[in-house]
Amino acid sequence: MKKELYTQVFNNIVISKRIFGFVQRKTDDGYRSLDSFPLYIVFLNEKLFTLKYQSYKYYKNKIGNRKEALKKFKQIKEKNEFIGFFESKTIPSEIFIELYQDFKDIKEFNKLLKDPSVQNKILFYSIKSLDRKRIEFLIKDEHRFDYNIKSYYITEITNIMGSKIEYIKYIVDSIKKYSKNYGIIKSFKKEKDKVPLFTNEIWNVESFEVLKYLLKEKESFFSDLTISGEYMVKDACKKQNLEMLVFSIKQFNVKPNFNNYNMEYWRDTSFEIFKYLFETYTDLRFNDISFHSAYNGDLEYAKYIVEGYINKDPRILITYRSLDRVAEKGSFDLAEYFLSKVGHLEVSRDALNNSIKSGDLKLVNLFKNVPVTKKGENFTIYDSTYQYIKKNNRLDILNTLQNDCIYSSYFENFIIN
């Protein structure tokens, strides 16, 4: 009952369990107090933080004891708690600024602010908060930041923001605007109108919009952004973004490398992209041995491959793995299509096992009387398949396997309960 009450109060089952666990572990003085919680937990939960902050304000304003008030956040001197403070999304802008200024009375907090291993990451930590006022305060009013941020941080910043281009622009423009007042700019007179961010090669971006923005702004940085064209092409394939792919190939003058070590170009991408690559580059070979996405459940994708195979396109190789994959993904329409078009060309024991574990009774019915034709392989039912039936109480699957299946002998003595 107590656990349910905590869940209702804090509206987060994970945080609630942590809180309940802390309170239940008694100390010499009785139950644990709010001060016993690590600050990073407090910074993660709005209600916990509100309780902590109200306690802090009580001592600071009502009692007038600033020193006692700061004890409420004494853990801030620890590195993890320090980072959690800057990253927190639960602390309102005005309160963050108030606490930041008060925390500077804590010697250990100031020491961390000056720590080189932390100092040049403070801005990055704060960007995770997605709080514009906090970012502007730290950039505009604080002079402690080392702006020599490598491409790792540029990449992480764009990933944090996702496709929120306006926010990314805001961060970059703010750094550019306010850093002009600092000594760092005076050392680079020729670079006075550039953003003081030094970068290495960028290998991935969060979205096509981010890529276009970085390309547009790349000369605005102290050292021009270097973006890997090959990785942008791969990234576009993974993101299943044809527009980004075509743009990247042209922009970076990249010809995709389709050897066995670069299957990521097409292995898990969309049919639209695969078709574009397959029809544009004659050296692309389709080999389902390394193909894991089961055609993304796209029947048109499967038809395109099968028709090429039937027409003896030398660039297409279909094996038993195509059926294994579509059964694993629970793609009944694709499995039915493959069986109707290419027959029982190499069927492995995984086809039925995978169809059972997919939970799709139609797939089970499709494969239950299909013999194994893979050379050198005998049929068997895996222990994980039995466990799936038992754990999920799939009596419907068990009944059809026991009563109308060429492999019914494997299931005749199997009992769920």
Image (spheres, rainbow, N blue to C red):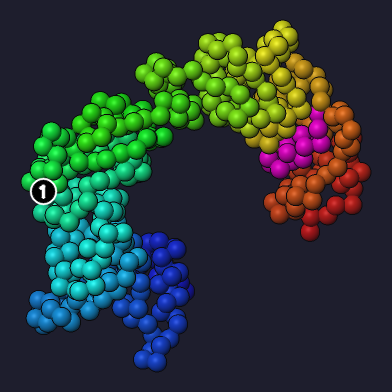
Q: Secondary structure at mark 1?
A: helix
Residue at the far right: name it: 409
Please provide percent x and percent y for residue 260.
Answer: 63, 27
Q: Quadrant of residue 285?
A: top right
Q: Nearer the viewer, residue 66 or 349?
A: 66
Q: Position of residue 264 (x, y in %)?
A: 55, 29
The answer to whether 238 is drawn above or below residue 18 in the figure is above
Q: Amino acid at mark 1?
A: Gly
Q: Main secondary structure of the magenta part?
A: helix
317 up-or-down from 122: above or below:
above
Q: Nearer the viewer, residue 173 or 65?
A: 173
Question: Residue drawn 15% across and 80% down?
Answer: 67
Give the percent coordinates (x, y) of residue 143: 13, 54
* Apparent side of residue 108 relative to residue 182 in the rendered image (left or right): right
Left or right: 118 as drawn, with respect to 345: left
Residue at left offset 14%, top offset 39%: 188
Q: Residue at x 80, y 19 (%)?
A: 343
Question: In the picture, residue 76 is in which quadrant?
Answer: bottom left
Q: Which residues are magenta?
A: 347-359
Say which residue label 1 marks. 183
Question: Is 377 within the magenta?
Answer: no
Q: Is residue 45 visible?
A: no
Asked if residue 262 lies left or right of residue 365, the reply is left
Q: Judge whether residue 349 is colored magenta.
A: yes
Q: Give the residue drawn at x 81%, y 22%.
A: 345
Query: Is residue 414 shown above or below 67?
Result: above
Residue 345 shows in this picture? yes
Q: Residue lying furthest bottom in this view?
A: 28
Give the position of the C terminus as an image quadrant: bottom right
Compare residues 407 and 416 and report the one nearer the observer. Answer: 407
User: Foreground: 314 or 200?
Assistant: 200
